[in-house]
Amino acid sequence: MNQTAGPTVAAKLGFADGLVVQELGWDDDVDETLRDQVEEVVGSSLEDEEYDGVVDAVLLWFREGDGDLIDDCVDALTNLGDKGFVVLLVPKAGHPEHVDASDIQEAAQTAGLKASSSSKAGADWIATKLVQGGTAKQR
């Protein structure tokens, strides 16, 4: 029986051919399979934190203890184009560095983003797609 594989996690998150994707928060614990999927779907390598051109999407890895999630969400907007989106990846529930959904929601809103969907992204990560158009709060 020949089964056709469904869309990859990367495709389900909105990554598509030709998008320029910047990666922030990389460390040796990231899900390399997801990174490979994103690169395969967009057709190019991920841009690193030093990239200063306009990007279509940002892959943002964040763990409890990495600093301030609001600041990282704002930083993710620095090179993001008008129609761009952020995929925030946090360790899954039960992991010591897990980030609560309420913290993600608050950080997104404060940065002017809106959480549109969340899904499992690999064995140890949860992905939340953040889109522009949230209401930024005064800080």
Image (cartoon, rainbow, N blue to C red):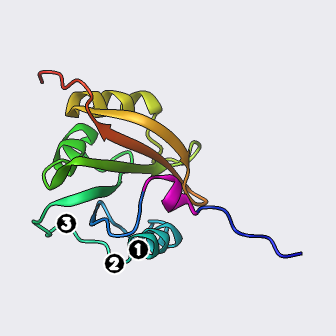
Residue drawn at x 50%, y 47% is: 96
Q: Is 59 situated left or right of 110 in this image? A: right
Quickly name the residue at label 2.
44
Label 3, label 2: how far apart the Cα atoms are: 16 Å
Residue holding disc 1: 39
Q: Considering only order in the chain, which callout, 2 or 1, is on the residue closer to the N terminus?
A: 1
Q: How many C-alpha atoms fall within 10 Å of the one at disc 1: few (<14), some, or many (≥20)?
A: many
Magenta range: 8-14
121 versus 21 height, above or below: above
Q: What secondary structure is marked by label 2?
A: loop
Residue, x 31% and y 72% (percent of image)? 46
CA neighbours of label 2 inside 10 A, class few (<14), some (14 to 19), many (20+): some
* Residue 64 x/y as whole percent: 38, 45
Question: Disc 3 or 2, which lies upstream in sequence?
Answer: 2
How many residues crowd around disc 3 within 10 Å: few (fewer than 14), some, or many (20 or more)? few
Asked if residue 105 is among those painted magenta in the image, a careful observer would answer no
Residue named by callout 3:
49
Give the amino acid at mark 1: Glu
How far separated are the C-alphas under marks 1 and 2? 5 Å
Residue 103 appears in which quarter of the rendering? top left
Residue at the spot x=29%, y=56% of the render? 58
Q: Earlier in the sequence, mark 1 or mark 3?
A: 1
Q: Which amino acid does label 2 sit on?
A: Ser
Q: What element carries label 1?
A: helix
Residue 121 point in image, percent of width and height = 54, 56
Q: Decide: marks 1, 2 in contact (CB < 8 A)?
A: yes
